[in-house]
Amino acid sequence: MTQDVTDVAALQAKQERLQALQMQLMNGFNLTPFNQHIGARIVSVTETEVRAEIAMQPCLVGNVFKQILHGGVIATLLDNVGGVAAMTAAYARLKGEPREEKMRRMGQLGTIDMRIDYLRPGRGEQFTAIGRVVRVGSKICATQMELRNEQDVLIATGNAVFHF
């Protein structure tokens, strides 16, 4: 019986640490001045997926005649959710390393390659960017991303590799 209580307490502590890390990632993203400027915010972080949202605004229009989302905004969102997904996976990959080493490695995380495929014009009022990890190695992490509008229409996809 004592072992069960210990196991439950250890699991609860692990979940609390994970939630604290997820909140740090969300706050770090959401408080970044550029993300605030364009109105992007992370709405969820899990071990397998990151989701960010942005509402259409006049300053985000890339084609004034068609009133569609600027391609640079799309690329920014996909790069950001891919990066946060990579950071989550990289942190988990470094389990057992000293905290200082984990923080040093997280501090150097950066995009080393990214490809965006613009599949449809960015029409919509609300957009969701989703990032998922494909593979995490000892120094790089591969991700896949997508952007959808409020009607779940796929606007763009992306692939990115991050160094950490």
Image: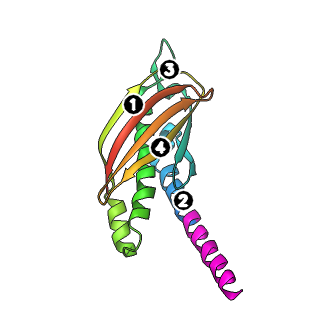
Choose between 10 and 122: the one closer to the eye: 10
Q: Which residue is mark 4?
A: 131
- Tell me which numbered mark, 3 or 4, is placed earlier along the sequence: 3
Q: Which residue is mark 2?
A: 22
Mark 2, Cα crowd under 10 Å, few <14 / some 14-19 / many 20+, is some
Q: Marks 2 and 3, Cα distance to the nearest angstrom?
A: 32 Å
- The colour scheme is rainbow
Nearer the observer: mark 2 or 4; the answer is: 4
- Tell me which numbered mark, 1 or 4, is placed earlier along the sequence: 1
Mark 3, Cα crowd under 10 Å, few <14 / some 14-19 / many 20+, is many
Q: Which residue is mark 1?
A: 72
Residue at (41, 56) in percent of width and height: 87
Nearer the observer: mark 2 or 3; the answer is: 2
Count of marks, rendered view: 4
Q: Marks 3 and 4, Cα distance to the nearest angstrom?
A: 22 Å
Q: Quadrant of the N terminus?
A: bottom right
- Tell me which numbered mark, 2 or 4, is placed earlier along the sequence: 2
Q: Which residues are magenta?
A: 1-19
Residue at (30, 60) in percent of width and height: 138
Q: Which kind of residue does numbered mark 1 sit on? A: Gly
Q: Seen from this angle, which residue lies furthest top?
A: 65
- Residue 68 image label: 3
Q: Quadrant of the C terminus?
A: bottom left
Residue at (42, 40) in percent of width and height: 144
Q: Which kind of residue does numbered mark 4 sit on? A: Gly
| Contact between labelled residues 3 and 2, with CB atoms less than 8 Å apart | no
Q: Position of residue 48 (x, y in %)?
A: 51, 51
Q: Is residue 52 above or below residue 122?
A: below
Label 2's element?
helix
